[in-house]
Image (tube, rainbow, N blue to C red):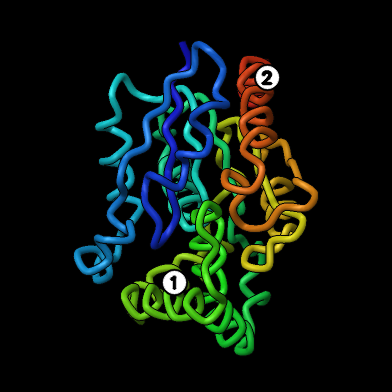
Amino acid sequence: MTRVVLLHGLGNNEHIWDALAGHWRPGVRVHAPRLPWHSGGIAGWRHETDSAGLLERVLDAAPGGADLVVAHSYSSIVLLELLSRRAAAGDPLDLPAVVLVNPFYRGDADDFQWDLIAETLDDFPRTMAESIRLRTTDRPIDAELLADMARRMTDWIGPYGWLRFFDSYLRTPLFPVAEVRTPALVVGGALDESAPPEEARRLAAALPAADQLELPGCGHFPMLQLPDRFTAAVHAFIDRIPLRAALALGT
């Protein structure tokens, strides 16, 4: 049995993974916890300053532990910070492997310029709208109503919630990712306008034991757009984990 823990992104919740339910193969047991930055819990989280520490407690509480952790969007940053922190301290996180999905990552602090702040902030409602639209395919939403729902979601997350995200993003060049030996699969969507696919490629190149996969025709939510291809990629990675672990250990 392979125990897979699924971590949703900022402003979503564990149901973002529901579309994958019929695609997991026998022998895969899935656990999708509700994280502190879920859509209904922003008010209790937005003033926190150590999301990695919160995530560590969530992973410690996973039933039976985890053979693989799959983290999407904002959670991929938080998991990367936790992995880097523990590796740099000489106490690597006890995880056999991870999948980082549509990650936000910059390898050089000089990559952050003033105009990126406005660009990322302006894109935030569009990302929320994409999530809402993809989760409501059974009842198409009028464009004006969709935009209003996205604005309401961004208002609910608020400046503190958005700043928690952007602060984590700003610190990605400072994460000692070269210390992380955990086998990883870094997944990017070729059409992702929120976390461009080159960021996934950049992160995969920086991690010592990483593979990289780009999904053609896919945006920021591959679990909603391509559930069959996404789970197939995770299954294929699961089958490679023993080999990747041996390479990471230098055996």
Q: In which quarter of the image is the C terminus?
A: top right
x then y, percent, for residue 126: 56, 74
> Is 169 situated left or right of 154 in this image?
right
Q: Marks 1 and 2, how far apart in space?
A: 34 Å
Residue at the right extreme?
A: 216
Marks counted in the figure total 2
Callout 2: 10 Å neighbours few (<14), some, many (20+)?
A: few
Element type at mark 2: helix
Q: Nearer the viewer, mark 1 or mark 2?
A: 2
x then y, percent, for residue 139: 50, 58
Q: Quadrant of residue 180?
A: top right
Q: Give the mark nearest the N terminus, 1 or 2.
A: 1
Q: Mark 2 points at which residue?
A: 240
| Amino acid under disc 1 | Asp
Q: In which quarter of the image is residue 24?
A: top right
199 in relation to 214, above or below: below
Element type at mark 1: helix
188 in relation to 121, above or below: above
Query: In the image, what residue occupies the spot 25% across and 32% down?
Result: 61
x then y, percent, for residue 171: 50, 66
Callout 1: 10 Å neighbours few (<14), some, many (20+)?
A: few
* Residue 247 circle label: none
Foreground of the two, 168 or 208: 168
| Amino acid under disc 2 | Arg
Query: In the image, what residue occupies the spot 45% across and 55% down?
Result: 9
Foreground of the two, 35 or 171: 35
Foreground of the two, 1 or 202: 1
Query: In the image, what residue occupies the spot 68% across and 75% down?
Result: 111
* Residue 167 circle label: 1
> Is 170 situated left or right of 215 in this image?
left
Residue at the front extreme?
A: 139
Foreground of the two, 109 or 135: 135
